[in-house]
Amino acid sequence: MFALTSASSRALTAAATRAFATSAAAPSSAAGVRFDFPVPFMTHKCSGLPDHAMATKEELLDYYRTMQVIRRMETAAGDLYKSKFIRGFCHLYSGQEAVCTGVEAAITKEDSVITAYRAHGFTYVRGVSVKGVLAELTGRQGGCAKGKGGSMHMYNHNFFGGNGIVGAQVPLGAGIALAHQYQGNKKVCISLYGDGAANQGQIFEAYNMAALWKLPAIFICENNQYGMGTAIGRAAASTEYYTRGDYIPGIKVNGMDVLAVREATKFAVDHARAGKGPFVLEMITYRYGGHSMSDPGTSYRSREEIQQMRSNNDPINNVKNRLLSTNLATAEELKEIDQAVRKEVDEAVEFAKEDAELPVEEAYTDVYKDTVPEAIRGCDPFTWAHPKH
């Protein structure tokens, strides 16, 4: 019901597609409207998952706006890259917005998040403005890392990146979870990685330590079906990533449904906060674009497959349909949100183009946190800089 079939179209099964499109809603109450999940959770060594979610108008409008901002921001990033305002690597998040939006809705700003290089969506939901994201991409001083990090290295309070080495963020996340446990602060760490990174040995080592020490660690595999250009079935003997923790409980989640993502993450977070140890979540999602800007994304999958996913399983349309079908919002209300989002992103694009670049001397600042040496060596033994701070 979750994974793409082995047929050439690799579309979701017809049953899952129909179910997703006809998600039932019950009458509203003080807690909001009940939405039954069209695709049930699949579990490993756990039980008690809900078959529905309650959501208010305010919550759904917030999720809708967040995902629209990310979608439009990523479209703008793609245009900036093609216009050569952005250089180097750039991995877009379009299609996967329900994952970062749903995860963030299930945790607090005091919890920690660390992810891979497809980081723009999580950077935004962790509190960085659209200007801060796009200016970081264009290498301007108004970026969230002063333009020094670029696409793969963005940070904010309790957001530890943005990491360029495949899978390396997962053991780092286990370390952050260890710090939370050591400090006894009841916080959790969310560590995200893709299906391509899921075969890395260091991930299993992190699983082992997290289970052995009962760390408050949530490991989330964003399974977007392709590791670079390789379909998951060609790269992994087992594609049931939610069972990969073996002795760690896991859940397979419809990652195109923001409410399913939220409820599954809440379940895992409650487990970890209670001192019961780590959890593995597999979010079945889909990226609309290529792996990076250098990948057209159509040499290993058909345009028809991409279009079918956009038409039948788009995470933004899913929330929009729920709002309209339950009369929680009108088409005019959503149009107003769309217009405000467009204005916000357009202004951020101009800022990212016009903001000043850092002076060359800044290459030698922010190397040390506190005590700054009088001189820092450059790329060879003969080049030395004397940072001012």
Image (spheres, helix red, strand yellow):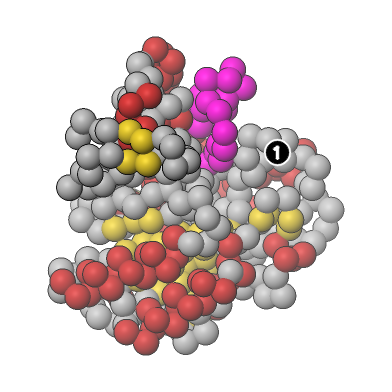
- Residue 307 visible to an observer of this rendering: no
Question: How many numbered markers are drawn?
Answer: 1
Residue at which label 1 appears? 295
Quarter of the rendering occupied by the N terminus? bottom right
Q: Is residue 107 above or below residue 333?
A: below
The answer to whether residue 3 is left or right of residue 349 is right
Q: Is residue 137 above or below residue 315?
A: above
Q: Mark 1: which amino acid? A: Asp
Q: Which residue is located at x 21 percent, y 43 percent?
A: 372
Q: Please tell me which residue lies in front, 85 or 268.
A: 85
Q: Is residue 218 above or below residue 115?
A: below
The answer to whether residue 381 is left or right of residue 291 is left
Say few, some or many: other residues with alpha carbon within 10 Å of mark 1 (under 14 / 14 to 19 / 20 or more). Answer: few
Quadrant assignment, res 70: top left
- Residue 185 visible to an observer of this rendering: yes
Q: Which residue is located at x 22 percent, y 40 percent?
A: 374
The answer to whether residue 1 is left or right of residue 325 is right
Q: Which residues are magenta?
A: 72-94
Residue 255 percent across, percent down from the top left: 51, 55
Q: Which residue is located at x 43 percent, y 48 percent?
A: 162
Quadrant assignment, res 67: top left
